[in-house]
Amino acid sequence: MPDSDPLHDDPAVRRRDRGLRRVGVVTAAVLTTAAAGTAILGAAYRSQLPGTASSPATAPTSGAQTPQSGTLRPPAQAPAPVAPPSQAPSATSGAS
Amino acid sequence: MTAPAVRHSTTTFPALGTTAVLLVADPDGTAEALRVLRAELAAIDLACSRFRPDSELSRANRGTALVTAGPLFAEAIDAALRAARATDGAVDPTVGPSVAALGYDRNFASVRPADVGPVTPVRPAGWRTVAWDPATRRLRLPTGTGLDLGATAKALAADRAAERAARAAGCGVLVCLGGDLAAAGPAPAGGWQVAIADDHAAPPNGVGPVVSVTGGGLATSGTAVRSWRRGGRTLHHIVDPATGDVPAPFWRTVSVAAASCVDANTAATAAIVRGARALGWLRGLGLPARLVRTDGSVVVVGGWPADPSPARPPADPRGGPR
């Protein structure tokens, strides 16, 4: 019995195997690139939609009158007592 | 900071289904301040009214399509979502369907007081379901969700109007919209004197305490005003987002002072919803507040001045009780 496989020694078979390996590498590269591209495009599209992970309703505010923090801010000075009023109050704060 | 003592001007007129009061420290600036206030009120009504079919809010509530908000509507949405975040959802702008289910589905003057139909609370979808991008100002509401910016939009209008009117008039200004007030610019000597009452329409020289403020916001929320009966129950316009129903009665009226009227009104409304838990919450935030229980007893926190003692003899021996 010969030690070597005559098929593997055949140059045509070796060329076929090299070709198959190249096809495999190219296929893997194409699949990887496609997956990465899909992920990138998907993330970009998601960022343009409201209500997604990058732009939930909890996103920081942008209004000029509303601060960025999520806390309610106390006044610079607490209301002071007026007793008895020196004149009739000018406004009333009550429920409406 | 206070300005020299000058007798301020007072202008009162109906607006936003309630009463607007404009105080201007220098009467010469009244016309300009009033022009700014009226423009602001018209703009906020067109952006945020629940009862105008042509408002931006109504258009957004009608469908699930993506809506691009105008700058003022966007600011109002920002304020409402920030209020929800700051109160852990106790003040939630998605209570629109809940408020409507309780019977407040039209201008309050048209609410049917004799409606005896049963009440079926509708739990709101929750503010976290609102798809809002402040950068692009694009808004999308899930099906069945409706925004109600009542807890913040009027206060936002007061803040904006006071700030702009003070700049336009070149003096101190106080804007009061249905009891939610904002002060900007130098206040008159002694500050702006504000009566605290259950009802904003109460006469300023009534029996409630009077405080002076020099800036920022002061707002009062309560259950005694804007209430109606339905299904054998007394209902009002403040909804507990956790249930879609009115909160369990605990506070009748809550007044809060804050850096802005939006913050003050947010805290006052949240306190009504939180009930007994509101005291610790307000203390933790350092917000001066006056809370009136349903039995009429009063609690103050955060440096809010105690009510004058009713047992104190009158200052003028010839006068009777004030």
Image (cartoon, coloured by chain):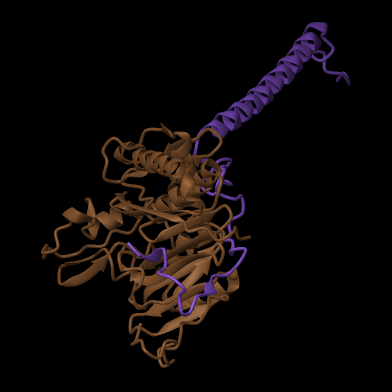
Q: Which one of the lettered chains is coloured purple? A: A
Relative image position of residue B279 (x, y in whole percent): 50, 77
Q: Nearer the viewer, residue B258 or A36?
A: B258
Nearest the camera: B232 or A64? A64
Q: Residue at x 21, y 58 (%)?
A: B103
Most distant residue in the right direction: A3
Q: Is residue B307 above or below residue B3?
A: below
User: What colour do you see for chain B?
Assistant: brown
Front residue of this view, candidates B105 and A74? A74
Residue B269 vs residue B188, the one in the foreground: B188
- Determine whether, in the image, residue A7 is placed left or right of residue B93: right
Q: Which residue is drawn at the image coordinates 46% and 39% (left, top)? A: B72
Compared across the picture, whether A55 is left or right of B53 comes to: right
The quadrant of the picture occupied by the N terminus of chain B is bottom right
Residue B27 vertical position relative to residue A3 in the rendered view, above or below: below
Q: Position of residue B301 (x, y in %)?
A: 53, 78
Measured from the top left, where is residue A57 in percent x and y? 50, 46
On the question of residue B77 being in view, the answer is no
Question: Within the image, what quadrant is residue A55 found in?
Answer: top right
Q: Is residue A55 visible?
A: yes
Q: Position of residue B293 (x, y in %)?
A: 38, 80
Residue located at (70% from left, 23% from top): A28
Q: Identify whether B278 is placed above or below B65.
A: below
The quadrant where residue A43 appears: top right
